[in-house]
Image (spheres, rainbow, N blue to C red):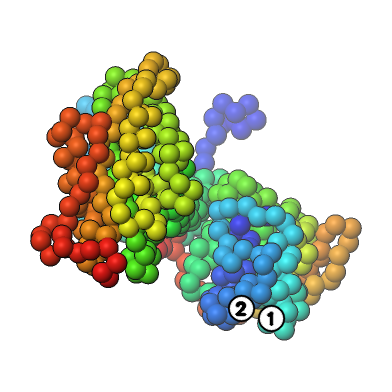
Amino acid sequence: MSVRDGSQTTLGRAALDRVLPLHLVLSAEGEILQVGPTLAKVTADAPLLGQAFFDRFELRRPTGLGSVAKILASPARTLRLRLNGPSPIVFTGLAAPLDDGCALVVLSFGIGVVDVLQKHDLTSTDFAPTDLTIEMLYLREAQTAALEEWRKLSERLAGARDAAEERAFTDTLTGLGNRRAVDALASKLVAAGEPFALVLIDLDYFKEVNDSLGHVAGDAVLKVVAEVLREETRRTDMVGRVGGDEFLVLMAGVAETGLARDISGRILARLDRDIPVPGGLARVSASIGITATSHYCQPDFTTMMQDADQALYRSKAGGRGQYSVGRPAGPVARTAAPGER
Amino acid sequence: MHGLVNKAIQSFVCDTYGDDAWASIVGDAPDVPHRFEAMLSYDDPITDRVIDLVSRHLGKSRDTLLEDVGIYLVSHPDVPGPRRLLRFAGATFEEFLHSLEYLPDRVRLALPELELPPIRLLDAGRRRFTLETGELFEGYAHVLVGLVRAMSDEYGALTTFEYSGRSDDASLVKVAVHAKRFREGRDFRLGMAVT
C-alpha cells in the first residue's frame, strides 16, 4: 500500500463512515458487511447488516446483474437501487472494487431526499459537509417561498386589473363609452326624470369583414364607425360601444324620436360607402332601432333597450341599412302623452 | 430597494402593532405606497422614509426599531420562512455564525435581485467574534443584530451583543457566546415545513 503514488489507499471503517455516511460494503457473495451511519439510521427498522444485498435491494439499472462481480464488471457507472420494504427508498449508487472481490457501494438519495426526510428525522450532521444535499434543500425551500410570493403578487395584480376593468368607463378600441358608462348615464337620467332618446345601432356585414379581411380590418371599421357617430351626434349626446359591433347613442333632453331619426338617417348615409382598411376596402351598413322617453308613462332603461332592440331587428328584417322606431309594448304606455309624467 | 425589505418592515408593523398602526403610518404620507409588494422594486429613499415614519410613530429609535425587525423576522410564528432558511446554515450556533459570511450568496441564490452587502465574521477566539457588514440602508447592521440575537435563542445559546460602531463603510458588532447550549433550542427538521 502506498499513499504517495496514489496507486492504492485504504480507508478504515471510521474514515469511511465520516466521509461517506451513505455507503455499503459487500462481500463477493453479496453479504452486507458494513453500513454507513446515515444509511443505518434510515434502515433502523430493518437493519441491513449481515443481510443479502440482493434480497434487500432491487437493482433497477443496469438490470439483470445478479452478483457483486457482475456489478463490478458492468460498464454502467450509475446504479439505480430500490431498497424494498414498507417504505421503499430509491438510491443512486456507484460501486467500486475492494480487495477479495468485495465492493464498496456509495449511495445518494438524489432528488428523492425530500421524501426520505418526510419519513426519517435526518439532520445536517447526517450528511457530509461536502454533500450539496443541504444546499439543495435550502434552495428548494427558498424557491418555494419566493414562488409563493410571486403567485400571491400575480393574484393581487390580476384582481387589481379586473377591478380596474370593472371601474373603467371607456372602450379601449374606439375611445367611446362602454356599456357601463351608458348604463350609468341612463340610470342617472331615469332617476332624475329627464327625457332622452335612445338610438341602438348594429352593424350589418361586420362579421363578413372580420372573416374575409381579418380582425385588424374589423377593428379599423369599428374606429371609423365610432368617428362617424361622434361627428353626426351632438356634443351633449353620449356615444357608447355596447357590444362587439353594437353602438348606442343616448340623447339627453330629447323626449321625442324626431331628432334621433334625423341623426340616424345621416349616420346611414355616411356609412353607405367603402371604408379603406388594412388589406382592402370594407363595406358595412347599419340597422338602427330608436325609442324615446315620451313613449312611456314611466320610462325604464331595460324596457327601452328591449324596444329599441326589437325595432333594430325590424330594420334588419326589413332589408338592413335602415332605422325603425320602437313602440312600447301594451296599450297603456302607448296612450302616454309627452309631459304627462 | 428590493420590495422584500420594505415588505418586511410593513409586516413587522402589521403583525406586531396591528394593521391600523400601519394604516395610520402610511395614511399621512402621500409619498409612500400604502402596501409593499415583496417581489417588486422600490426607490431606495422610500425605505429610509418608511423607517423614519415607523420610528416616529412607535417612538423607538431607528436602531432599536431595526433590531426589533430582525428579531421579528426570525421569531414571529407568522413568518416561519427566514428562521427555517437560516437554520439550514448549521447544526450549532457557532456554525451558524460562521455561515453568515455565506448569507448574501445564499440570498442571491433564492432572489437574484436582492444584493445584501458582504458580511465578515472575525473569530477572536474564546467564543468572541466580530461581525462586520456593509450598509444596505442606514442602520442595516441592527437588523442583523436582531436576527443573530433571535437565532441565538433559536439554538439555545447564551449570547451578548455590542454594537461597536462603524469603520469606513462597515458596521462592527461584537458577539460573545457565553454558553453554547444554555437551554434547549427550538426544534428544526430538514424536511420541509410546508405552509
Q: Horizontally, is A110 left or right of A201 in the view?
A: right
Task: Check if mark 2's residue and mark 1's residue have beta carbons within 8 Å.
Answer: yes
Residue under circle 1?
B57
Q: Is residue A60 left or right of residue B24?
A: left
Return the x and y of residue A289 as percentages of the image width and height. Answer: 24, 44
Q: Secondary structure at mark 2?
A: helix
- Depth order, front residue of A14/A81: A81
Dot 2: chain letter: B
State the residue position of label 2.
B24
Please tell me which residue is depicted at 59% across the width and 59% down the height of the picture.
B4
Q: Residue B132 appears at what percent x and percent y?
A: 78, 60
**Secondary structure under the numbered disc 1 in the rendered image:** helix
Q: Amino acid at mark 1?
A: His
Image quarter of residue A339:
bottom left
Q: Is residue B31 visible?
A: yes
Q: Earlier in the sequence, mark 2 or mark 1?
A: 2
Instruction: Give me the chain letter of mark 1.
Output: B
Q: Residue at x 84, y 71 (%)?
A: B164
- Name above or below for residue B115 compared with residue A104: below
Q: Is residue A166 above or below residue B12?
A: above
